[in-house]
Amino acid sequence: MAVANGVLVRASTKEPLFSFGVIADVQYADIPDGRSFLGAPRYYRHSISVLQRAVRRWNEQGNIKFLINFGDIIDGHCPKDKSLWAVHKVLDEFDKFDGPTYHMIGNHCLYNLPRRKLVSLLKMPTDSDRAYYDFLPFPEFRIVVLDAYDFSCLGWPDDHSVTAAAMKLLGERNPNTDKNSSDGLVGVDRRFVKFNGGVGSEQLSWLNDVLQDASTHQQTVIICSHLPMDPGSTSPAALMWNYDEVMAIVHQYNCVKACFAGHDHKGGHSVDSHSVHHRILEAALECPPGTSSFGHVEVYPDRLLLAAAAPASCPGDGLISSSVSVVRRSSVGSSADGVGVEILLVLLVKCSRTGIVSSHTKISLRRFITKGPPD
């Protein structure tokens, strides 16, 4: 038993229906470490080591059915003559997983390659060049992957109608000469920057149809997007341009229980006005050598558990905010890279037809320091 947000919850001993691995913002580049515009350290070469460690762990667990990569597979600073090589290098690591990987497009992907090329390289399960899709990993669960740059200034040809419309929107909403700057913008208006994007009208219609079908078949839905869609979960400058339109559709139905995203490297968590959880995953890119940022989601009939692998030498709750209650499973050994397989249960979501009844405050997947061999 454990207390989460003042609610007593019980840790189930039953096996999950299925589990899937999650990782965000690898942003690999074969260049020296650097810093973001805001000064955050970025470990371009180490990020692929985080992915390698993650794939080893997921394979060792043996029950991870598939992976979801939340976009930004390589970094925008990757030399353009090495972009294709870098994408293949990262995809080769994902291919070492004993199952499929589902990708989505992020802004850094589009800095390097056009979207049509990316859809092909990332082997998106679509019948066209579109980068949004859904699939059923289990009869009663549906995963919906959005293309958060369907409507954007990135990835489309300069003379494309979408590019023109997106630039017109930014011209109206962002007075800065540098459209990647949010200077002078206030609150959620800070989202109107060039490195963000939105969901186009055709995709909005598709999403409505998918959620309607899921409701008809009494399926629980998990939505995945590179861009966050709730102001409470992220910095305003990281929000999807038309997050409000997307969530207006989502809130028409009771089937969506959680939305996962990347993009905001520090991570975040919120529960919106309709009890939908929004969990932003911390970036692999910003993990110093010896640390990692990845996890997996265990899916049960009545809840989702977002879990992170903890180090064998983890000093109690020292790496976790003292305000957070943690449910632990007992440790069952350590992996080849020296990381214990103890799992921290991070997010508890009630998936009953009546909605969410309790939730764990989010715990960072990042900064779990490993004591294994050096990368």
Image: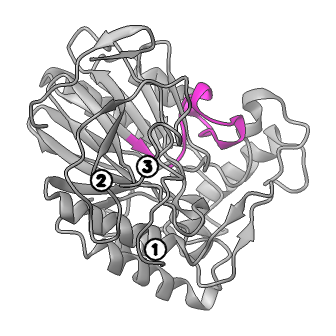
Is residue 166 shown above or below 318? below
Q: Is residue 228 magenta?
A: yes
Q: Nearer the viewer, mark 1 or mark 2?
A: 1
Helix, strand or loop at label 3? It is: loop
The residue that appears at 31% across and 56% down in the rendered structure is 340
Coloration of the structure image: one colour
Residue 38 or 245: which is nearer the viewer?
Answer: 38
> Which residues fall within the magenta stretch?
224-243
Label 1 crowd (10 A; few <14 / some 14-19 / many >=20)? many
| Residue position marked by numbered label 1 in the rendering | 49
* Residue 314 circle label: 3
Q: Nearer the viewer, mark 2 or mark 3?
A: 3
Task: Tell me the distance, in whole angstroms, between the alpha carbons under discs 1 and 2.
Answer: 16 Å
Q: Quadrant of the N terminus?
A: top left
Give whichever of discs 1 and 3 has the lower sequence position. Answer: 1
Residue 169 or 1: which is nearer the viewer?
Answer: 1
Q: Amino acid at mark 1?
A: Ser
Q: Residue 205 at x, y = what percent?
A: 38, 34
1 and 3 marks in contact (CB < 8 Å): no
Label 3 crowd (10 A; few <14 / some 14-19 / many >=20)? some
Q: Residue 341 at x, y = what percent?
A: 27, 53
The residue that appears at 56% across and 49% down in the rendered structure is 151
Helix, strand or loop at label 2? It is: strand
Helix, strand or loop at label 1? It is: helix
Is residue 245 shown above or below 339? above
| Residue position marked by numbered label 2 in the rendering | 21
